[in-house]
Image (spheres, grey):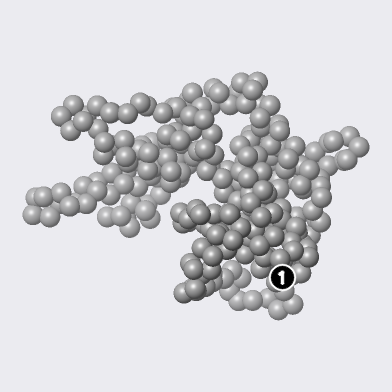
Amino acid sequence: MAVRDRDTLFDYAQEWPVRMAVVCRHGVPTHMVMTLCHLVTDVAGAMVMFHDFMGRDPATGQARTPVGIQPAELARRQRTEAERRRSETSLQYWEELVRAIPTRRFTEPPDKPEPRYWQCWFTSPVMRLALGAAADRTGADTSTVLLAAFGLAMVQVSANNPAVIRLVASNRFRPGFADVVAPMSQFGLCVVDAAGLTFDEVVRRARGRMMSANKHAYYDMYSLAECSAGSPSTGARRSTCPSTSTTAGFSCSYRPKRRPRRR
């Protein structure tokens, strides 16, 4: 049932974007299957909805916790002058970084691999211990340590410094956003200069860059399509979207799916 619902496309115009089913064994419910359209919410929003459903009063069906910001209200807030200014600040952050980054960061391989796209898995039995040790030394959490390791490896393999990485920011640390059932995640741009630094120094630098990337990852996505290395004298923006541009080297993304361990 889960595979069927996952592999069946949603009818965006006619279908409710949530599919739910209950699996029974000998008449007793054993599993609940929930499939959501990703255009409607992200994983964190889905968990908000799930916990709201499971926490409701079994007799009345009423919610026991306050209702979060609704998508329509969120859209109204985004049109306010204060939110527009916040978006513009984020766009300026992107533009400043984009202008400082070389246009082409990755060269084509001499031999065209087949198939064109590859998936790789790397399993390390010592990774968990090493992340914890580095976190204890530097005072960073393990997600920051892993980001630093990823960035440093990318610099070494590609011979391109700094590391330019797109992060997926949840944006749920912002006031009132924790319980929103909507797609809140957006890309943040993280640039880490690793030249001449030890690994621990890269970790400390990555921590600040990661915070800046998350801070400036809430913006008008249509306006971001105009943010690129425009004219330094006029501040004009070209219609090139750095969130998807491969020629500018923005195709490298980092998205850990694990809970960070703090010190």
Q: Residues within 10 Å of mark 1 (few under 14, many from 20)?
A: few
Quadrant (top left, top right, bottom left, bottom right) of the N terminus? bottom left
Give the structural element (helix, strand or loop) at label 1.
Answer: helix
Q: Residue at x 51, y 54 (%)?
A: 263
The residue at which mark 1 appears reads as: 156
Q: Nearer the viewer, residue 81 or 19?
A: 81
149 vs 110: above or below: above
Left or right for 110, reference 179: right
Q: Residue at x 9, y 50 (%)?
A: 27
Q: Residue at x 66, y 32 (%)?
A: 87
- Whether residue 11 appears in this view of the structure is no
Q: Amino acid at mark 1?
A: Gln
214 vs 180: above or below: below
Residue 233 location (% of width, % of height)? 91, 37
Residue 163 location (% of width, % of height)? 71, 59
Residue 18 location (% of width, % of height)? 35, 41
- Whether residue 232 appears in this view of the structure is yes
243 vs 163: above or below: above
